[in-house]
Image: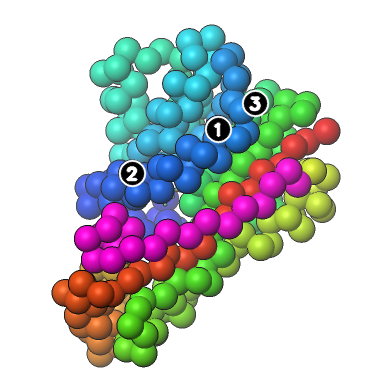
């Protein structure tokens, strides 16, 4: 199934970018997963697993008696994870090709459901969480990592880069997503009877040589031209944003602050 609604697209460039992104944010995801205390033997769902970078780490945590199901609408990404598992001889994995909203998921089954950078893309986040809740076993845990897009900024300030945040928010909205999804999630949990366990914001910052700066560089240089192509921003706005960004890239005193990524976890009764 092709996920035509997925704004970032699925291709080799994006696969590599997601891999690099995983490395940059790994420490934060690892700390979140450690805090949750995933046990050997757990049945885990990675919803919107992409190429399976976190799913692979989850496999280590659940051990050979546990299992990890990767659910992902992109055939290319799920095949990438399938190939990784085959190469590494990992057998306790399951693969579901599809979107969370449409997928046939077992009910009352998973001990843990995880979704990193997925719910921000979906037009109906409540439906998304409700579907995942049904798949959770009693006292199962749901964990979400996603953006509260405020906080993003580039120092020294005042250049055309200041127009980037509204542009990228419009990019997510183009297919019905919301880059400011994180603060909406506790209320969704409340409506669905999920007990909120944690809500913890994270940010990364660094100069041009840092991983977080390079991470944003790989996003902005690829996606700003696509925003122009889709008519989300004008050619001149796109060019000015990239010029300002590249000037900061060549200024060793620049600092980039990432948008806030919130770790959110909840428990069902
Ligand atoms: C930014 S990537 C994140 C991938 C992975 N979770 C990670 O952290 O590396 C977003 C992924 O969500 C998937 N996706 C988008 N909409 C989805 C939906 N409705 N249900 C499940 N996955 C979805 C995309 O195909 C893509 O692989």
Q: Nearer the viewer, mark 2 or mark 1?
A: 1
- The first of marks 3 and 2 along the sequence is 2
Residue shown at 41%/13% (left/top)? 91
Gap in angstroms between the C-alphas marked 3 and 2: 26 Å
Helix, strand or loop at label 2? It is helix
Residue shown at 50%/71% (left/top)? 151
Gap in angstroms between the C-alphas marked 3 and 1: 18 Å
Residue shown at 48%/42% (left/top)? 29
Q: Measuring from the top left, give residue 229's x and y in whole percent.
A: 28, 76
Asked whether disc 3 touches disc 2, contact meaning CB atoms under 8 Å apart, the reply is no
Asked whether disc 3 touches disc 1, contact meaning CB atoms under 8 Å apart, the reply is no
Magenta-colored stretch includes residue 142: no
Q: Measuring from the top left, give residue 247's x and y in whole percent.
A: 19, 80
**The magenta stretch spans which residues?**
196-219
Nearest the viewer among 219 and 50 is 219
Q: Measuring from the top left, give residue 83's x and y in whole percent.
A: 28, 25
Residue 23: mark in rendering: 2
Helix, strand or loop at label 1? It is helix
Q: Quadrant of the N terminus?
A: top left
Magenta-colored stretch includes residue 208: yes
Could you tell whether 149 is left or right of 230 in the image?
right
Could you tell whether 139 is left or right of 3 in the image?
right
Residue 172 seen in the current view: no
Q: Which residue is mark 1?
A: 34
Q: Measuring from the top left, give residue 227's x and y in whole percent.
A: 33, 74
Q: Residues within 10 Å of mark 2 (few under 14, many from 20)?
A: some
- The first of marks 2 and 1 along the sequence is 2
Q: How many marks?
A: 3
Q: Which residue is mark 3?
A: 110
């Amino acid at each position: 199934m092709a996920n035509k609604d997925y704004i970032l697209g699925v291709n080799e460039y994006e696969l590599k970018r997601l891999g690099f992104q995983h490395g940059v944010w790994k420490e934060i995801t690892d700390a979140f997963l450690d805090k949750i205390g995933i046990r050997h033997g757990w049945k885990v769902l990675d919803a919107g697993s992409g190429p399976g970078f976190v799913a692979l780490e989850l496999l280590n945590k659940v051990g050979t008696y546990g299992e990890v199901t990767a659910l992902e609408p992109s055939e290319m990404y799920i095949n990438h994870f399938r190939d990784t598992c085959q190469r590494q001889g990992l057998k306790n994995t399951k693969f579901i090709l599809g979107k969370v909203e449409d997928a046939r998921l077992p009910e009352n089954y998973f001990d843990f459901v995880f979704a990193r950078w997925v719910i921000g893309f979906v037009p109906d986040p409540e439906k998304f969480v409700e579907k995942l809740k049904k798949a959770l076993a009693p006292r199962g845990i749901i964990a979400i990592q996603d953006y509260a897009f405020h906080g993003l900024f580039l120092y020294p300030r005042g250049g055309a880069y200041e127009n980037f945040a509204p542009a990228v928010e419009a990019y997510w909205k183009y297919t019905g997503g919301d880059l400011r999804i994180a603060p909406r999630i506790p209320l969704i949990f409340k409506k669905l009877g999920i007990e909120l366990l944690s809500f913890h914001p994270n940010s990364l910052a660094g100069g041009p040589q840092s991983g977080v700066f390079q991470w944003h560089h790989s996003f902005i240089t690829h996606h700003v031209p696509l925003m122009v192509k889709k008519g989300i921003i004008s050619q001149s706005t796109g060019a000015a944003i990239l010029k300002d960004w590249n000037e900061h890239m060549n200024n060793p005193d620049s600092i980039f602050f990432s948008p806030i990524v919130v770790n959110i976890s909840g428990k069902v009764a």
